[in-house]
Image (cartoon, helix red, strand yellow):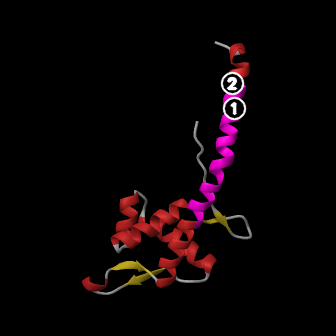
Amino acid sequence: MEIKTKLYVVNSAGEKFMGIGVLWLLKEIEKQGSLLSAAKELGISYSKAYAMIQKLEKELSVDVIERKKGGAEHIGSSLTPFGENFLILYDSFQNSAKDLLLSPFIQFSDKVENLIEEFGSNEKE
């Protein structure tokens, strides 16, 4: 038995704007130096990736990526200094939040195993 969690940050209307998918996208943009290349690497459309970034930036009211335009030397995207720091901060937050669930899950799992041992002889085949 294991635990899987999905952690999202939502706005006041309850709409998701930050989660693991956006985190992966930001990491790929940082790695690839391009929103298009990051989207391809993650197997999502450019328009979906662009919309994810737009929604994040709208909710935070800060640019997360810098879009370079014009000529071959300026093609691509990179994280802004805010985006770099936000990525580190969110990644740390989500890892800490998941770590906090580990101890209660272990306790739960142990209690379930005890219940199975106690009631397992009544199991249906």
Q: Which residue is mark 2?
A: 116
- For badge 2, the amino acid type reads Ile
Question: What number is the disc on residue 112?
Answer: 1
The residue lying at 31 percent from left, 85 percent from top is 74
Depth check: give the residue in front, 115 or 75: 115
Q: Position of residue 89 (x, y in %)?
A: 55, 72
- For badge 1, the amino acid type reads Val
From the viewer's perspective, is residue 4 above or below residue 82? Answer: above
Rendered image quadrant of residue 39: bottom left
Q: CA distance from mark 1 to mark 2?
A: 6 Å
Q: Does the stretch in magenta take in 96?
A: yes
From the viewer's perspective, is residue 97 above or below residue 103? Answer: below
The residue lying at 60 percent from left, 55 percent from top is 99
Depth check: give the residue in front, 64 or 40: 64
Query: Magenta stretch: dominant SS?
Result: helix
- Check contact, mark 1 vs mark 2: CB within 8 A: yes
| Relative side of 45 to 11, left or right | left
Residue 97 visible in the displayed image:
yes
Local SS, label 1: helix
Rendered image quadrant of residue 78: bottom left
| Relative side of 54 to 12, left or right | left
